[in-house]
Amino acid sequence: MPNSELLYSWLFIPFLIFAARICDVTIGTMRVIFLAKGYKRLAPFLGFFEVIIWLVAIRQVMMHLENAACFLAYGLGFATGNYVGMMLEEKLSLGLVILRIVFRKNSDDFINFMRKSNMGYTLIDGEGNSEKVKIFLSVLKRSNLKEVLPALRNYNPGAFYTIEDVKNASEGIFRGAEAPFIKNIFRKMRIKGK
């Protein structure tokens, strides 16, 4: 077998399969995340591209069944695609979360930070195992956590907190307008096009 055919079979085809799997699994991960967060119109659009890319990858694997590098590339592409999809979702910071904090000591500085930052919250008196506590609840844009959590660690480092995804929320105080994700994409494209 000439060198060029060897390179094509054992390097180029596995690389193509690896790259295709990264793309289709990343898109699939994002599709599932968008569905869970309520972006129902975007999910089918992504699903179309996901399956087309998957067909390209699986066709190459089936055409080169004697090539173990293709199987390895398929598996590595799948694993890498999952990782890339999760990292991309984390960077996009889509959706809403509920931040639940249990304060054992004075929470005034953190509450003042939230008030000045125009982020809504509810503060409730509670009772822990051995002491009175304050329970703080806030529904926030996930992107706001980048400034809220450092402020919490600064003002009240010993506070216990949990964060959970929220699919929908109505009313409330949210800093900035929450525009639908797809509208934001098209708005950004129009601005760049000017």
Image (cartoon, rainbow, N blue to C red):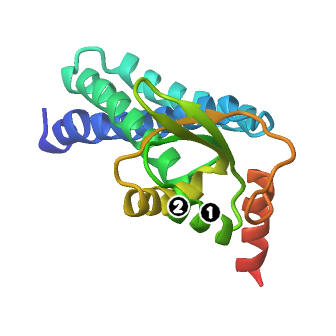
Residue at image point 56% right, 53% down: 92
- Visible residue check, residue 48: no
Q: Residue 118 lies in what quarter of the image? A: bottom right
Position of residue 55 relative to residue 2, above or below, is above
* Position in image of residue 91 (x %, y %): 49, 54
Residue at (22% x, 21% y) in the render: 67
Q: Quadrant of the C terminus?
A: bottom right
Residue positioned 23% across, 15% down in the render: 66
The amino acid type of the residue labelled 1 equals Met
Q: Which residue is drawn at 37% across and 38% down?
A: 83
Q: What amino acid type should be assigned to the residue bearing mark 2?
A: Phe
Question: Quick check: 144 left or right of 77?
Answer: right
68 up-or-down from 81: above or below: above
Please state if 38 lies on the left or on the right of 32 as rendered. right
Residue that numbered label 2 is attached to:
110
Q: What element carries label 2?
A: helix
Image quadrant in which the N terminus is located: top left
Q: Tag 1's secondary structure?
A: helix
| Image position, residue 173 (x, y; %) | 79, 56
> Between marks 1 and 2, how big is the CA–CA gap?
6 Å
User: Decide: marks 1, 2 in contact (CB < 8 A)?
Assistant: yes
Relative image position of residue 184 (x, y in whole percent)? 75, 61
The answer to whether 108 appears left or right of 179 in the picture is left
Neighbour tally class for label 2: few under 14, some 14-19, many 20 plus, Cα within 10 Å: some
Q: Where residue 129 sits: x, y (%)?
A: 42, 23
Quickly name the residue at label 1. Answer: 114
Query: From this viewpoint, which residue is outermost toward the front?
Result: 131
